[in-house]
Image: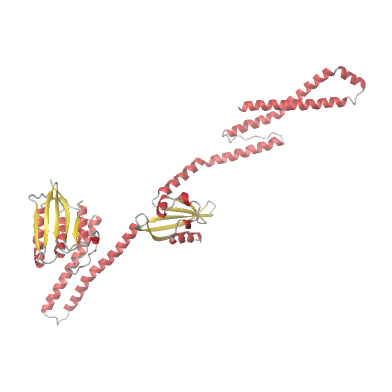
């Protein structure tokens, strides 16, 4: 294609040059007729045909020479420009000696230098890097919002879109205030723009999807260009609901532990101080000593339950799984708590199916579970009521149920009774106080056995706590 253009150019140039040269030669010949004598004119007239032919030959010769001189630098320019178009930016065009062609030559050389620079930039690498960064930002678990220095939104990832209920497409290049009305976030962006390099806040937000309140931590910092120019603000928003609730529970736990320890310690301290009085009667000494002993026992049980629960949660207690006789274990526990039940005029009994298999689990821990459930059943049942432990073998499992017809549990408290130190509000019928750790410990032990603790209760009618253990082969 380039060769055909070359031939066409050379042909047109040759014809134009020949016509111009012929025109000047004819003009010179006509002017000479006025300057020479008549004889010469007669000679020219007699030899006009020969003279015309010589003029044509001379014009062709001059045109050909001119074409050679002009076409060489033009052809060189065409060849070099073709190489540049093919991506060979090392090929520089040398000077032609013609001021007009040299201007074109300089422009081509400059173009080659710029094309080489652009090639070295590696645009594909830049595009790939940008795509990777965008993919990371869009799939990160935290919300990300990027604005310019005028709070115009430049980028919002999917987490932030879901959190605040708008899309990047809709918000692009629009003011942040139009889409976010959380005062703390707006103040955070303002503090960064006003001069702070980085800043951090914590705020709560009610999510529209399920109307639950969640807690977030937002941090922001300035964005600088390569020339160290402040060009924007980036903010990362992290969901800290779990951490917030955990910290709150820790604070509540410390408060509850302090409260639970304070009550028995106050009694121990007070009655110990009374015993120092030498005038105290012997009957009172025995009474005060019993109070101190009971409160100390209560304190020891509380501390032991708390330590056992902590060890189980941290995996510091090794579960010793082995077959054991659950029927005999229940008989042993009933005998232990019989006097406690009789003191409250409560009938304690056991029912079971005709055949009971050996259970599979940690006997000591399962004993603690049944003791906790039975103790609560007796404690929160009125005088004259019944408490029953029922054993039923079904398929390859044995179901253990502790059934009472006591005061029952309010419906709104059933899901809370397994929390540490949670206690149902006292009713008019009972003044019993528990540690608030028994059911939490019970549930943790059964979780370690992959057994679920089921609860059914009706206020004023009683409760049923049950769980199932695997039968041993």
Residue sitting at 73 percent across and 27 percent down?
16
Relative placement, left or right, of 426 versus 28 is: left
Corner quadrant of residue 298:
bottom left
Can you say whether 7 is above or below 372 in the image?
Answer: above
| Quarter placement of the C terminus | top left
- Residue 128 makes an appearance in the image: yes
The quadrant of the image that shows the N terminus is top right
Query: Would residue 470 be found to the left or right of residue 310 on screen?
Result: left
Residue 241: horizontal and vertical position, in percent? 35, 58
Quarter of the figure with residue 380:
bottom left
* Image location of residue 293, percent across then percent down: 15, 70
Q: Nearer the viewer, residue 405 or 191?
A: 405
Residue 174 or 80: which is nearer the viewer?
174
At horizontal 44% and vertical 61% (from top left) the residue drawn is 183
Which of the 4 image quarters holds residue 238?
A: bottom left
Relative image position of residue 284 (x, y in whole percent): 13, 78
Farthest right residue in view: 38
Q: Residue at x 61, y 39 (%)?
A: 111
Classify residue 199 as left or right of residue 368.
Answer: right
Measured from the top left, where is residue 267 in percent x and y? 20, 73
Q: Is residue 306 above or below residue 324?
A: below
């Amino acid at each position: 294609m380039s060769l055909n253009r070359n031939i066409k150019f050379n042909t047109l140039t040759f014809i134009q040059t020949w016509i111009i040269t012929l025109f000047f030669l004819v003009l010179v010949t006509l002017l000479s007729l006025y300057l020479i004598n008549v004889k010469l004119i007669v000679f020219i007239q007699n030899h006009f045909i020969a003279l015309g032919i010589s003029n044509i030959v001379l014009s062709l010769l001059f045109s050909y020479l001119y074409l050679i001189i002009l076409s060489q630098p033009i052809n060189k320019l065409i060849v070099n420009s073709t190489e540049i178009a093919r991506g060979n930016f090392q090929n520089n065009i040398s000077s032609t000696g013609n001021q007009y062609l040299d201007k074109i030559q300089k422009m081509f050389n400059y173009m080659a230098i710029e094309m080489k620079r652009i090639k070295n930039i590696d645009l594909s690498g830049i595009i790939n890097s940008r795509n990777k960064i965008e993919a990371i930002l869009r799939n990160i678990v935290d919300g990300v919002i990027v604005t310019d220095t005028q709070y115009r939104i430049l980028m919002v990832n999917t987490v932030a879109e879901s959190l605040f209920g708008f899309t990047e497409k809709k918000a692009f290049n629009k003011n942040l205030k139009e889409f976010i009305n959380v005062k703390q976030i707006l103040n955070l962006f303002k503090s960064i723009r006003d001069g702070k390099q980085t800043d951090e806040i914590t705020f709560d937000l009610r999510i529209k999807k399920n109307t639950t309140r969640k807690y977030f931590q937002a941090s922001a910092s300035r964005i600088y260009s390569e020339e160290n120019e402040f060009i924007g603000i980036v903010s990362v928003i992290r969901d800290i609901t779990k951490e917030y609730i955990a910290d709150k529970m820790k604070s509540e736990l410390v408060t509850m532990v302090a409260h639970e320890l304070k009550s028995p310690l106050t009694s121990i301290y007070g009655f110990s101080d009374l015993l120092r009085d030498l005038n105290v009667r012997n009957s009172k000494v025995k009474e005060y000593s019993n109070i101190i002993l009971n409160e100390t026992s209560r304190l020891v049980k509380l501390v032991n339950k708390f330590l056992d629960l902590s060890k189980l949660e941290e995996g510091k207690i090794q579960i010793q799984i082995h077959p054991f006789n659950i029927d005999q274990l229940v008989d042993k526990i009933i005998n232990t708590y019989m006097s406690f039940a009789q003191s409250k005029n409560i009938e304690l009994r056991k029912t079971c199916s005709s055949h009971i298999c050996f259970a599979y689990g940690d006997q000591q821990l399962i004993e603690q579970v049944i003791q906790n459930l039975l103790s609560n059943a007796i404690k929160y049942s009125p005088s004259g009521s019944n408490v029953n432990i029922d054993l039923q073998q079904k398929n390859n499992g044995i179901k253990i149920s502790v059934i009472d017809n006591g005061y029952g549990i309010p419906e709104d408290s059933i899901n809370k009774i397994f929390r540490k130190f949670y206690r149902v509000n006292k009713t008019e019928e009972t003044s019993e106080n528990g540690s608030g750790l028994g059911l939490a410990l019970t549930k943790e032990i059964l979780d370690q056995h992959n057994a679920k603790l089921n609860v059914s209760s009706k206020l004023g009618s009683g409760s049923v706590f049950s769980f199932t253990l695997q039968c041993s082969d």
